[in-house]
Image (tube, helix red, strand yellow):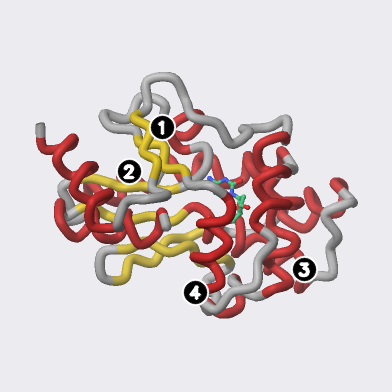
Amino acid sequence: GKSTTSRAVSKALNLLHVDTGAHYRTLTKLLLDRGISPNSEGAVVEGLQNVALETVVEGRSAFLAVNGKRPDDADIRSEEVNAKVSLFAQIPAVRNKLKQYQRSQKDIAESSAFSGLIMEGRDIGSVIFPEAPHRFFLFADSTTRTQRRAAEGQKDSIIERDKTDSNRKTAPLTCPQGAIEIDTGNLSIQRVVERITQTIGK
Ligand code: DC
């Protein structure tokens, strides 16, 4: 998947790796813990007030910490979060809360010893960094993706989530103009990584 691929590219090219799906998952977990439903936009807006976003760099990856705490990976990849994250991610207040934060990751990469930033997510090439020097749009058919999730031991309704993510009004999942499309369905991770690193190296 895109996380495995982008982590491998980050290693090959000494780039700071940022998984923005984890950002949406982290806010989803926080809001769910506060008993807030994605159906109540007002409650979501209120629930995000006084939530401080900070960055923890560990190895080659940057992680989002909220109010001083970085959540456990298991907690943001639970079945409950899988089921709700798309619903929270379509709320403009949630996306706006993360937009500046995600753009600020570029400065963190630059002020550290990294050669640059690799950021993965559905709207990075379209909304967050439309001017990035290299933009890649990875896709695979939903059968392949469901199989990959299952291989990770995760239960996840990929098809449902794809539909919500592609049809939402704010920053829908789409291949932005000018991005390089890669069909990962019948390519090994290694081949995808090579394609990306070779393109960047040119
Ligand atoms: O990549 P992932 O499965 O961890 O992402 C979880 C959800 O977060 C995804 O269903 C939609 C949302 N998301 C988003 O809306 N925009 C991003 N840049 C990244 C993720």
Label 4, label 1: how many angstroms apart (C-alpha)? 31 Å
Disc 4 marks which amino acid? Ala
Say whether residue 103 is left or right of residue 49.
left
Determine whether the beta carbon of the residue marked 1 sits less than 8 angstroms from the nearest atom of ligand 1.
Answer: no
Identify the residue at horizontal 42%, vertical 58% (top origin): 1
Task: Give the labeled residue for mark 1.
Answer: 129
Seen from the viewer's position, the closer of residues 120 and 158 is 158
Q: Reply above or below: 143 against 184.
A: below
Task: Give the labeled residue for mark 4.
Answer: 151
Task: Give the labeled residue for mark 2.
Answer: 106
The quarter of the image holding the C terminus is top left
**Circle 2/circle 3 CB separation < 8 Å:** no
Q: What element carries label 4?
A: helix
- Image quadrant assignment for residue 6: bottom left
Say whether residue 69 is left or right of residue 115.
right
- Image quadrant assignment for residue 8: bottom left
